[in-house]
Amino acid sequence: MKKLFALIFVTLLGGCASSYHNIDLEGESALGGGFRDKKIAEGMYKIMAKTNFAPWLNYSAAHKTFNRRAKELCEGDYQILRTTASQSEHMETEGLAKYIISKVDGYVLCENTLTSKEEAKRLLKLEY
């Protein structure tokens, strides 16, 4: 019985972290997590990162996924131009604990790009 409880506990904890996978290439995760990105200009990207569902907010995990993807796309250092954090319910529950997905959306500009900060700001205005 203790082994079964431990297995269930570990499985539940695993659902609380972020899945690091590309939603566009690998599809949506049953647990809710992953990332999506879009190239705006040379060295400028829009990134969305979200956590697996959990009964609490976990923006730090969403930011961790966001930053990991930015570093991969930029192959090094980058500047965050703008981010917003939000949350959504993974599924409806009847009075029980809610299952929340924490999400971070934002834009990054790679340090080693020819796109200027002024051009990036102009493009950012066009996105909104």
Image (tube, rainbow, N blue to C red):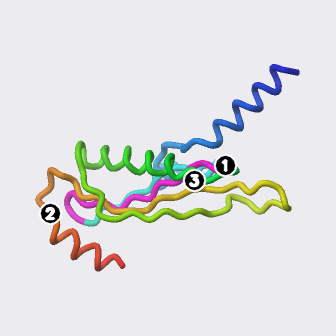
Residue sticking out furthest to the right: 1
Left or right, 87 with reference to 39? right
Q: Secondary structure at mark 2?
A: loop
Q: Secondary structure at mark 3?
A: loop
Residue on which the image places disc 2? 115
Which stretch did the figure color magenta?
41-54
Magenta run includes residue 45? yes
First reached walking from the N terminus: tag 1 or tag 3:
3
x 68%, y 58%: residue:
90
Residue 4 at x, y = what percent?
82, 24
Q: Quadrant of residue 125?
A: bottom left
Q: Quadrant of the N terminus?
A: top right
Q: Residues within 10 Å of mark 1 (few under 14, many from 20)?
A: many
Residue 68 at x, y = what percent?
38, 44
Left or right, 34 with reference to 76? right
Label 1 amino acid? Ala
Residue on which the image places disc 1? 54
Label 2 amino acid? Thr
Residue on which the image places disc 3? 28
Q: Quadrant of the C terminus?
A: bottom left
Q: CA distance from mark 1 to mark 2?
A: 38 Å
Residue 109 at x, y = what percent?
24, 58
First reached walking from the N terminus: tag 3 or tag 2:
3
Magenta run includes residue 100? no
